[in-house]
Amino acid sequence: MAIVQNWLPPSRENWELVCYIWQFFPVITAFQWLLDWYPQGKTSTNFRFNIPGAIGWATMESAGFLTLVYIMNALPKELGIEELPWGNWTMAGCFVIHYTYRAVLSPLFLNPSMSPIHPLVWTLAFLFQIFNSTAIGGWLAGYGPTTVHDWAGRFWVMEIGLVLWAWGLLGNIFHDDDLREIRRAADRQQRQEAEKLGKPPKSVHKVYMIPKNGLFKYVLYAHYLCEWIEWAGFWMVGGWHCGPARMFLVNEIATMLPRALQGKRWYIQRFGKEKVGNRKAIIPGLV
Ligand SMILES: NC(=O)c1ccc[n+]([C@@H]2O[C@H](COP(=O)([O-])OP(=O)(O)OC[C@H]3O[C@@H](n4cnc5c(N)ncnc54)[C@H](OP(=O)(O)O)[C@@H]3O)[C@@H](O)[C@H]2O)c1
């Protein structure tokens, strides 16, 4: 049963329209190159309608994998496809694993604190998720490969893509956790001091330091770089002609690259050029 007739799950015509519009997403990110105003994370502002960080991330990022799971279940029935091939389920699994971490575990259970999000940033991220999951979900659930033969002869490329995807995800989690450790360590220290003074511990909200482990030695946004590697591997699994996986990677780069460059400017302003040293924003030795 469709939730929204012809849209959720999408008819072929509407899916093609979504994919067409989605390729222009980098144009929207032009404002990130022109403006330093980006009210989220390090550069969050005190806006009265801000959404608390953890709730904001959980809600905006869950929209993607929930939409994809729904399309994977509903669309094949509408199209009369009895069973989708394992390649389709493998890619859907990769997507769901990543977003279970990003939308549920990370904000709700692992992150010590997250800055509030402006409703505009939340809305753009939510729309990103809807477009992306509709494009990928439609491809995986009936408008892309539908039989085992469609995947034939691609086993080795898929395997390499999956390895890349897994290393990218692990790298992303490792570097995310290095950032968490900064606040966990600060929290331990605040608690020790508070115990000595007999006062309640101070919050570690908005405590920042320069991360130094792993690839953070070379770049300030190592977690972003690993996420790009992850989705490059995902695209490889889907194959060169998997437009939705390609658009996902391109659109992530389009929004995360200017954000990382802005972040580097923020680190230099906050800690000084000397402390930041030779670190690049996102690609070692390059950018
Ligand atoms: N932003 C995007 O456009 C985007 C797009 C796709 C995927 N992602 C992925 O989503 C994840 C989070 O992205 P993000 O843009 O929120 O990353 P981020 O700005 O680096 O923040 C990640 C988390 O670490 C904290 N943090 C950041 N830098 C810190 C530092 N120097 N010291 C201590 N804590 C620090 C942040 O706290 P605060 O919130 O208080 O700053 C936040 O909880 C990343 O793994 C990224 O790959 C992001």
Image (spheres, grey):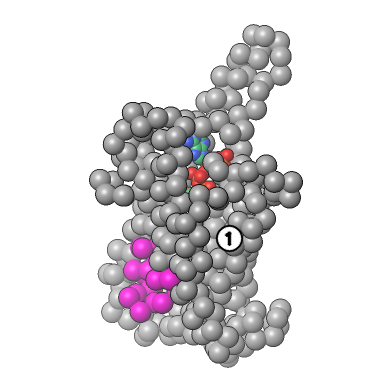
Q: Secondary structure at mark 1?
A: helix
The image quarter in which residue 189 lies: top right
Does residue 176 sit above or below 275 in this rendering? below
Classify 226 as above or below 141: above
Q: Is residue 174 above or below residue 76?
A: above
Q: Nearer the viewer, residue 3 or 285?
A: 285
Q: Which residues are magenta?
A: 231-248
At 67% from the left edge and 42% from the top edge, which residue is drawn?
46
Q: Is residue 182 left or right of residue 52?
A: left
Residue 139 in percent (x, y) is at: 48, 79
Residue 174 location (% of width, % of height): 43, 42
Q: Amino acid at mark 1?
A: Ala
Residue ID at (65%, 27%): 203
Residue 249 visible in the current orientation:
yes
Instruction: Please name the predominant secondary structure of the magenta segment in the image.
Output: helix
Q: In the picture, which quadrant includes the N terminus?
A: bottom right
Q: Is residue 90 visible?
A: no
Q: Residue, x 71% and y 10% (percent of image)?
A: 198
| Closest to the observer, 25 or 92 | 25
**Label 1, on which residue?**
125
From what the image shows, is residue 27 above or below residue 215?
A: below
Residue 162 in picture, x, y percent from top left? 36, 62
Residue furthest front as drawn: 34
